[in-house]
């Protein structure tokens, strides 16, 4: 629903311009969601200004909200929060120079796991060298055949048999 004279927006903070344009088109497509567009652009512009004012070591800081003159920033750790507190006067003055009416800055610690997301490995995608398959076979044969070991022995033998076929 974008008119031909309307220029597409790039929302600050998105990694992909295509994603950004898709998001703005989605927001414009519905009247209720279109009401979010000014807020999204405002927060994006504020985020850009915060990143420009703060030193690069604070790149992980994100704007959570800006209401009634109170800016809330999310930081990844308490150590960053402690250092950021020293930068708040500079940040507040810099934002006021850019026209933002910031009266108060709050910091909220939001821990994020820094474990990279990876696809789950499928058992069939794992390959074992022939020596490992032989070791599993030997283990299955060497375990004492007790009721407690019965399921373990069966599982080890199945694993070895499957790996022989796929390997």
Image (cartoon, rainbow, N blue to C red):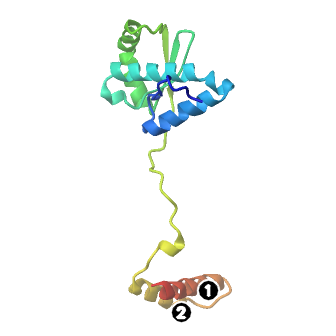
Give the labeled residue for mark 1.
Answer: 154
Asked whether the viewer can see residue 111, the reply is: no
Q: Secondary structure at mark 2?
A: helix
Compared to 69, does 61 lie above or below? below
Q: Residue furthest front?
A: 4
Element carrying mark 1:
helix
Percent across and percent down for residue 116 are 44, 50
Relative to 88, residue 24 above or below: below
Residue at screen point 48% across, 34% down: 20
Relative horizontal placement of residue 114, taking residue 38 as reference (left or right) = left
Task: Measure the alpha-carbon separation of dots 2 and 1.
Answer: 10 Å
**Quadrant housing residue 35:** top right
Indicate the quadrant containing the N terminus: top left, top right, bottom left or bottom right.
Answer: top right
Tell me the residue that label 2 is attached to: 141
- The answer to which image quadrant residue 167 occupies is bottom left
Image location (x, y in percent) of residue 47:
44, 23
Which residue lies at the image location 55% right of the left edge and 26% below the top edge? 3
């Amino acid at each position: 629903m974008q008119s031909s004279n309307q220029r597409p927006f790039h929302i600050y903070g998105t990694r992909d311009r295509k994603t950004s344009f898709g998001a703005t088109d989605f927001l414009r497509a519905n009247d209720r969601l279109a009401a979010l567009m000014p807020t999204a652009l405002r927060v994006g512009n504020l985020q850009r200004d915060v990143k420009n004012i703060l030193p690069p070591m604070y790149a992980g800081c994100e704007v959570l909200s800006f209401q009634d003159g109170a800016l809330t920033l999310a930081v990844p750790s308490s150590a960053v929060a402690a250092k950021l507190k020293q930068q708040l006067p500079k940040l507040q003055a810099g934002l006021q120079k850019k026209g933002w009416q910031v009266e108060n800055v709050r910091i909220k610690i939001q821990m994020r796991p820094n474990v990279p997301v990876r696809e789950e490995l499928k058992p069939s995608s794992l390959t074992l060298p022939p020596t490992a398959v032989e070791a599993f076979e030997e283990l299955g044969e060497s375990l004492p055949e007790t009721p407690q070991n019965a399921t373990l022995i069966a599982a080890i033998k199945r694993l070895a048999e499957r790996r022989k076929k796929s390997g």
